[in-house]
Amino acid sequence: MHKQWSCSVVKQASAFFWFYVRLNSTKARPTAPLGSRILTNPDDIFKHNMWDHVQWTKEDQEAARQRAEENSSIQLPLTEQGKFSTNACQYWDQFYEVHQDKFFKDRRWLFLEFPELLPSSAEEKRTNACRSHQVAAEPASSSSRTNGETGHCQHNDPIQHSQKQIPFISRKQQVLFNCFNLTFHFISSQVGCGVGNSVFPIVNTIKNTDSFLYCCDFSARAIQLVKDHPDYDDSVCHAFVHDICEEADSFPFPPQSLDTILAVFVLSSIHPQRVQKVVNQLSTYLKDGGVFLFRDYGRYDFSQLRFKKGRCLSDNFYTRGDGTCVYFFTKEDVHNLFSKAGLEEIQNLEDKRLQVNRGKKVAMRRVWMQSKYRKPPLPSPS
């Protein structure tokens, strides 16, 4: 029995060691962004469920374009389109009522593609920022100092003034603010969190660190499922109902208070005419140097090409049978969206993969966008 236990501990320690080495040997970044399983021999196509970095020929691109043009040739009448905006929350509530938390898998790939979510990488950035600030400032003012006990930079942090910037918050949120004013130094937010498929991989990683996660969704049913999850921990996470399309709705945190914002398959569900205002508003909540992390559907993804005629609302924007909507982005769309919000490009990738159903011997071309945009840091004092 003792021998079996020892063997189990050794295996776990070994697995953790190699994961740690992988992260640190690449400065907390994956060895191959977007995966490294390359299909070199067509005969091997059904040996795996997914192939990475799939190259499209000109013929492939043209066939996809024609298919999208064909299925969007008949659009829903404008008189019928309004319900998909006004009743969007109702459609998603119904979706979560039917599927609960069983439809999507937990996104355990998050930290490989978005290491910015890891507290360690955030601490490195804050430490470097603090050092550069100290060198530039002579002598250091009371608003720019390093805590000798924790080593965290405390210069001009908007969190310190949260009570002045938020006109009213509930007692529960007030305690939350007071708590992380004293303790938390890395704050993230996930918008459109659904039932927590991104939330809980993050929550289980940031426990016992000085990080805090906010997550919101406009579906009250989805947020309740998040709070009912056994891994939900309100000491490191606060889930709340919020419609990011409503400018009048306030967040439970002040502007310029977030280190990262995560939007995974969220912005595609918003009407293309409204999404720029959403990104503009969300970007105001990033700290200087904070990062907006984005992953969503790309143009000519398999899911776009299989829409039937009559489901198109506008160019590359469709409604599914359950009433939920989806837009398919290009790299240019993504770049314009974030650059117009005043953010700088770190990464803007088109992730083309081949998804394989080995049972049915079917291969599907998937296209996703993966991007990182940063709010410009304040210039160093001269």
Image: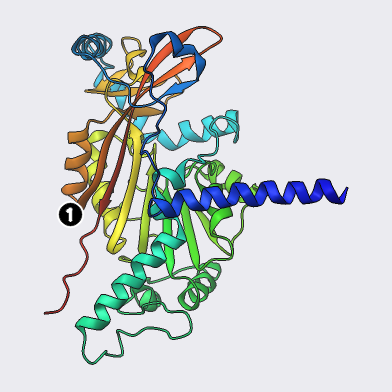
Q: Which of 221 and 177 is in front in this view?
A: 177
Q: In this view, does 239 lie above or below 105?
A: below
Q: In the rendering, at what x and y percent does residue 350 appear? A: 28, 31
Nearer-the-camera pick, 279 or 314: 279
**Count of numbered badges drawn on the protein:** 1
Q: Is 74 placed left or right of 2 in the picture? A: left
Q: In this view, does 193 lie to the left or right of 371?
A: right
Res. 304 image quadrant: top left
| Crowding near the residue tagged with mark 1, few <14, some 14–19, many ≥20 C-alpha atoms within 10 Å | some
Element type where label 1 sits in the image: loop
Instruction: Work out which residue is located at the far bottom of the displayed protein and give it.
Output: 139
Image height check: is 130 above or below 260?
below
* Coordinates of residue 213 in the picture (x, y in percent): 48, 58
On the rendered image, what quadrant is the C terminus found in? bottom left
Which residue was labeled with disc 1?
342
Query: Which residue corresponds to the image point at 49% horizontal and 12% vertical from the top-left?
Result: 46
Q: Is residue 253 visible?
A: no
Q: Is residue 334 left or right of residue 22?
A: left
Q: Which colour scheme is used?
A: rainbow
Q: Quadrant of residue 129?
A: bottom left
The reply to whether residue 334 is visible in this rendering is: yes
Tell me which amino acid carries mark 1: Gly
Is 342 rendered above or below residue 208? above
Residue that appears at 34% across and 48% down:
293
Q: Residue at coordinates 47% horizontally, 45% vertically from top-left?
A: 193
Is 126 left or right of 228, judged from the image as shown?
Answer: left
The residue closer to the viewer here, 128 or 170, is 128
Q: Which residue lies furthest to the right in this view?
A: 1
In percent of width and height, residue 326 lies at: 35, 28
Instruction: State the residue at coordinates (31%, 79%).
Output: 155
- Residue 285, percent across and down? 31, 61
